[in-house]
Image (tube, rainbow, N blue to C red):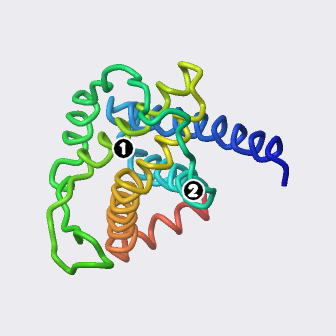
Amino acid sequence: MSDRTMADDLAAVERQTAEDVRAFCDIVTDVARGDAPDSAIPFLLLGLSQVLLTGARLGAIQDVVLVEKFEPDPGPDVDTDPVRDGLARLFEGLDEYADVVDPVTSVELTAGSLSNDLASIVVDLVHGLQHHEAGRPVEALWWWQFSYLSSWGDRAASALRVLQSVLSHIRLDADHEIVAEAEFDALHT
């Protein structure tokens, strides 16, 4: 593979990652705003699945190396307090969960929080998006790859697992008679 082909491939990955990052941040912001509380869990489940696919793509490519020794400062971190607060309100009673510190090196448990996880993922992703929008694609790709491996990938995987578990309880722990009546009504109306 030529250097030019590799550069074109990385540029395509960077552009696709920027699109996926924007889509994920939009979903989280909309859910935190309370636009569709009944759809919050499925929307977040889909958004997290997509952004984890994006992260897996970043993890599968060669290591991105910065041109300069240090990454240029993209500016201040985005204020995610409104997102965090909106999600905490939405997930009241479900926000906190048990998490494994590192499933490879430790069985130690710690507390996790959906609202904190989702807000910190947004901070990491927007940091890279700031590089992208400033015309620094190598820095954007480097940041997204580095932060996927060091922070947001783990938080996204944990949040996905929690939301999938919550959705399973919602759907599978329902009263069987009510479910049967709803299925009958859906099939015969």
Q: Give the number of the disc on residue 183.
A: none
Reading the image, the residue beneath label 1 is 121
Label 2 element class = helix
Label 1 element class = helix
Measured along the vertical axis of the image, is residue 73 above or below residue 47? Answer: above
Tell me whether the residue at label 1 lies in contact with that at label 2, contact meaning CB atoms closer than 8 angstroms: no
Residue depicted at x 24% and y 27%: 82
Query: Could you tell me residue 174's position as x and y percent?
Result: 33, 70
For residue 170, what is the image quadrant?
A: bottom left
**Left or right placement of residue 176 versus residue 84 in this view:** right
- The residue under label 2 is which amino acid type? Leu
Task: Tell me which numbered mark, 1 or 2, is placed earlier along the sequence.
Answer: 2
Measured along the vertical axis of the image, is residue 134 above or below residue 174? Answer: above
User: In this view of the protein, which residue sits in the foreground, 116 or 27?
Assistant: 116
- The residue under label 1 is which amino acid type? Ile
Reading the image, the residue beneath label 2 is 53
Measured along the vertical axis of the image, is residue 175 above or below residue 7? Answer: below
Residue depicted at x 21% and y 80%: 107
